[in-house]
Image (cartoon, grey):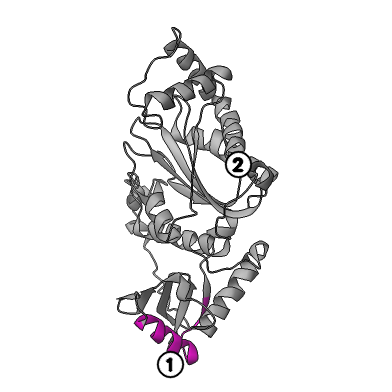
Amino acid sequence: MENDHGAYCYTLRPGECTVSYQPFSRRSKVTVMDPDQLSTDYMDNKRPIQFENNAHKDKFSIASARKMKQRIQILTAVVPKPKYFKGPLQMTGRLCLAFATFTLASSQVHSDQLIKHEILNPFLKCVQRRYGIISYIWRAEKQANGNLHLHIIWDRYIAWAILVKTWNYFQNKLGYVDRYSINQKEFYKNGFRLRSGWSNCNTAEKQKIAYLKGKACGWCSPPSVNVQSLKTVISIISYLTKYMMKPSDAGSVSGRLWGCSSNLVNAKGSQGFAEGSVADELSTLEKMSGSTVYKGDYYYVIHFNPKLLTPGLFPLLASDWLSWAVAHFPIYFPPDLINT
């Protein structure tokens, strides 16, 4: 599929392969502008018109959604699948795909940008330094109560107790744990009573247990971290993509909606020419059970079951992917790189 002007190339990730026509050279059109025709906005250094209303309104653009999905596909493929661990504190720091949600302990009184700058960023730096986190993806969204909360996927197992202690330390830099303690002491000043609308403890017995635990530590350790288990999830890519890209319950997040570690920023997957035996494997992949194909004028995208990408079925494609993954993420080698 090559001619004098260009060739078809592929970009491969577990679950998705994009084949597109790439010209060998791009023509560039040089336009000479008459200074008298320059807009006053340009001369006055004002924002270009395309950026005047550039708020995301808590919705992912097509490009942003595609980038996040690509990062999730790569991260879930190179990090070992979660397992049942014995002695969770001792297993902290072990390579394992993990997913957790982090909330504020009391009502939000700071801007979304400040929370991400003063709580999220220092927290991520801390877990990277102490527990060896290398790759991560985070997503910010609003809860029904208007508070900002964050979903994070990363590559290490960290015990829940450690996560709670670390997250609460950083969120209390802005006073959220202290305000939580004051609110709880005021609510229970006359002893235990039921609290309505408490989704995590929706029975009297659970609320009583939570009350006793909170009172024992002086209400200084709010359960502001929820670790979601991925051990029984059949399709981790689909589960995480849907979870990370769902709309907020209420309101719009100010500033960035999501981010990732530096090693994932430009990670796209293995690439090569879609010709010869590789083209034959791509044609076979299209016809596999469960595969779907979306075709455009100069490209097509194959969505397939990631478990199909094995040396037995597709030796060239599987070898290209493995070589790329090992070169870009050597820390994760030699785990099973196609695990979903």
- Kindly state the secondary structure of the residue where label 1 is placed: loop
Using the rendered image of the protein, determine whether residue 50 is visible from the camera's viewpoint: yes
**Which residue type does callout 1 highlight?**
Asn
Q: Say above or below: 2 vs 258.
A: below
Res 86 label: none
Res 3 label: 1
- The residue mark sitting in front, 1 or 2, is 2
Residue segment shown in magenta: 271-287
Q: How far across and down, in percent of the image, does residue 57 sit? A: 32, 44
Q: Quadrant of residue 37?
A: bottom left
Q: Give the residue displayed 43% in from the left and 41% down from the top.
A: 255
Horizontal relation, residue 195 to residue 272: left or right? left
**Which residue type does callout 2 highlight?**
Ala
| Contact? badges 1 and 2 (CB < 8 Å) | no
Q: Which residue is mark 2?
A: 159
Query: Which quadrant: the N terminus?
Result: bottom left
Along the line of sight, which residue is nearer the eye, 337 or 9? 337
Mark 1 or mark 2: whose residue is earlier in sequence = 1
Q: Say above or below: 2 vs 9.
A: below
- Residue furthest to the front in view is 205
Q: How far across and down, in percent of the image, does residue 188 sit? A: 44, 12
- Kindly state the secondary structure of the residue where label 2 is placed: loop
